[in-house]
Amino acid sequence: MLDFSRFAILTFDCYGTLINWEDSILRCLNRILAAHSKDTDDATLLQLYGDFEASAEQGECRCYRDVLHSVVDQFGERFGFAPGDQEAGSLAESLKKWKPWPDTIAALRVLETHFQLAIISNVDDDLFAATRPQLEVDFAQIITAQQARAYKPSLKIFELALSRIGVPAHRVLHVGQSLYHDVIPAQSLGLATVWVNRPSARSGVGAVKAATAHPDLQVASLAELAAACAQP
């Protein structure tokens, strides 16, 4: 078990960790595929989403709306159809409606009594602005890919976060659902990490690129982390 007393701030990945993006992604992609008489299982959809998103985030940084447009286009290429303009934009448009996991709000309220909280997210500022009211707590800092001009697992976004937070790396605990995007780069900069291994149609991975890592703590939910932090 981690010594939580050593940490001054908890930084969170948002989508996947605090927000149940997987259900929304699957609903949107299944709807698009069905419109073109295509079909596959949810685990395959999530694997392809993770790979397509990572591919779209390579090279010159573009906004997350364009990343999500690219993901839909890549699904069209893979399954042999051309998405219409509305379909291409539907995944990005759906993001503002993505909902928190059932345990997120209560857990954040417990955690904010012990630590400062911050967000480090692969998203545009305007897209996160639609999500922020749903989280119902105050964040000391919100660092986005748009601000850093880089997407996790790039170290640039974590380095920007550390410079903004102003706390030594060893006093920061980073919490994320993705080993690839969060645990590996955070640990490389000296941050302790918690892997929130949320339930998924693609168990142990979810809608991200597969990776192997060794987080400092693994939990199945944010409620489990909040309970651990609240122990005397």
Image (cartoon, rainbow, N blue to C red):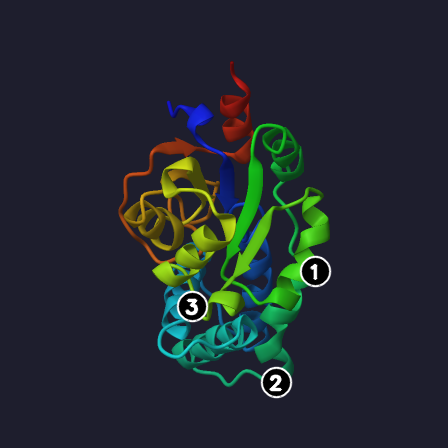
Q: Note whether residue 146 is visible.
A: yes
**x then y, percent, for residue 196:** 45, 39
Q: What is the three-letter code of the residue carrying label 1?
A: Ala
Q: Residues within 10 Å of mark 2 (few under 14, many from 20)?
A: few
Residue drawn at x 45%, y 45% is 176
Q: SS for tag 1?
A: helix
Amino acid type shown at disc 2: Asp
Type of amino acid at the residue the image marks with label 3:
Ala
- Residue depicted at 57% across the width and 70% down the height: 34
Residues at marks 3 and 2 touching, judged by CB atoms closer than 8 Å: no
Mark 1 neighbour class, 10 Å CA radius: few under 14, some 14 to 19, many 20 or more: few
**On the rendered image, what quadrant is the N terminus found in?**
top left
Q: Nearer the viewer, mark 1 or mark 3?
A: 3
Q: Write down the quadrant of residue 51 in the picture.
A: bottom left
Q: Tell me whether circle 1 and circle 3 mark residues in contact (CB < 8 Å).
A: no
Name the spot of residue 72 as percent of width and height, x first: 50, 75
Q: Secondary structure at mark 2?
A: helix
Please report whichever mark, 1 or 3, sits nearer to the chain's N-terminal start: 1
Q: Disc 3 on helix, strand or loop? A: loop
Q: Which residue is mark 3?
A: 150
| Category of crowding for the residue at label 3, using alpha-carbon neighbours closer than 10 angstroms: few (below 14), some (14–19), many (at least 20) | many
| Sequence order check, earlier mark of 3 and 2 | 2
Label drawn at residue 130: 1
- Of circles 3 and 2, the one toward us is 3
CA gap, disc 3 to disc 2? Answer: 26 Å
Q: Is residue 1 left or right of residue 10?
A: left
- Residue position marked by numbered label 2 in the rendering: 85
What's the residue at 55%, 60% (across, down)?
Answer: 25
Q: Is residue 227 above or below residue 93?
A: above
